[in-house]
Image (cartoon, grey):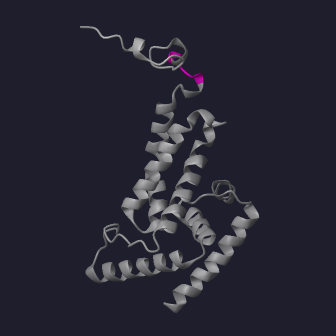
């Protein structure tokens, strides 16, 4: 038995049977492949960036997934597909900011620690890493983001400025101030 559901559609509404809506949007051609390749190449690094910012692997993964989902939804509005990585990077930073605003404290994930050679080295290394992350997270947001993008993702100032929506001079200034504050905080610990 064949049912014709197109006859039940309200007048003026487009749907899958409509020839107007069935025409593919040329801006969306290759969207899934392009985003899939971008995800394969950069999702791990972006997740690590979000993990440094948030201290939680699960929250970091959620933020990165939301960023890629946002890119998928807005692919047709993207002026230049070569700037998709910058869009996702900015989305990850914005997502981290939102998570940090919603929750005053995020517990550090102890499972994200690389293996070490001895028990003593493991304890010292883990404690030093926790102190560094605590000191980094105590910095003002702009300084923290600049340091994470510069030294964790190893981005040049131009890409950091683009991702954060600020000038390159502001990036340099925030980096210098952030490093000085991070040094002071580490000496105090």
Question: Splitting the image into 4 quarters, where does residue 26 fall?
Answer: top right
Query: Where residue 161 appears, x then y in whole percent?
Result: 68, 58
Query: Where residue 183 appears, x then y in whole percent?
Result: 58, 83
Instruction: Return the residue found at the far top.
Output: 1
Q: Quadrant of the N terminus?
A: top left
Stretch in magenta = 22-26
Q: Residue at x 36, y 78 (%)?
A: 126
Q: Nearer the viewer, residue 10 or 131?
A: 10
Instruction: Return the residue found at the far bottom.
Output: 188
- Please count the marks in the image: 0
Q: Is residue 180 magenta?
A: no
Q: Nearer the viewer, residue 74 or 92?
A: 74
Q: Residue at x 52, y 67 (%)?
A: 101
Query: Where residue 145 appears, x then y in whole percent?
Result: 58, 66
- The reply, left or right, for residue 136 in relation to residue 118 is right
Q: Could you tell me what secondary structure mostly forms the magenta stretch?
A: loop
**Quick check: 42 above or below 110?**
above
- The reply, left or right, for residue 71 in relation to residue 174 is left
Q: Residue at x 60, y 48 (%)?
A: 86
Query: Where residue 63 appears, x then y in whole percent?
Result: 46, 55
Q: Nearer the viewer, residue 179 or 101?
A: 101
Q: Residue at x 55, y 48 (%)?
A: 88
**Quick check: 70 above or below 135?**
above
């Amino acid at each position: 038995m064949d049912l014709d559901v197109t006859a039940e559609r309200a007048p003026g509404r487009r749907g899958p049977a409509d020839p107007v809506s069935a025409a593919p949007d040329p801006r969306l051609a290759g969207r899934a492949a392009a985003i899939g390749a971008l995800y394969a190449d950069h999702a791990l690094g972006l997740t690590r960036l979000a993990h440094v910012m948030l201290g939680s692997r699960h929250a970091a993964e959620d933020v990165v997934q939301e960023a890629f989902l946002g890119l998928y939804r807005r692919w047709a509005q993207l002026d230049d597909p070569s700037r998709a990585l910058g869009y996702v990077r900015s989305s990850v930073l914005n997502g981290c900011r939102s998570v940090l605003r919603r929750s005053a404290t995020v517990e550090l994930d102890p499972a994200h620690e690389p293996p070490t050679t001895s028990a003593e080295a493991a304890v010292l290394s883990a404690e030093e890493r926790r102190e560094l992350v605590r000191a980094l997270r105590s910095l003002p947001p702009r300084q923290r983001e600049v340091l994470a993008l510069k030294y964790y993702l190893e981005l040049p100032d131009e890409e950091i400025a683009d991702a954060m929506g600020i000038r390159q001079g502001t990036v340099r200034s925030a980096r210098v101030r952030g490093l000085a504050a991070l040094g002071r905080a580490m000496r105090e610990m």
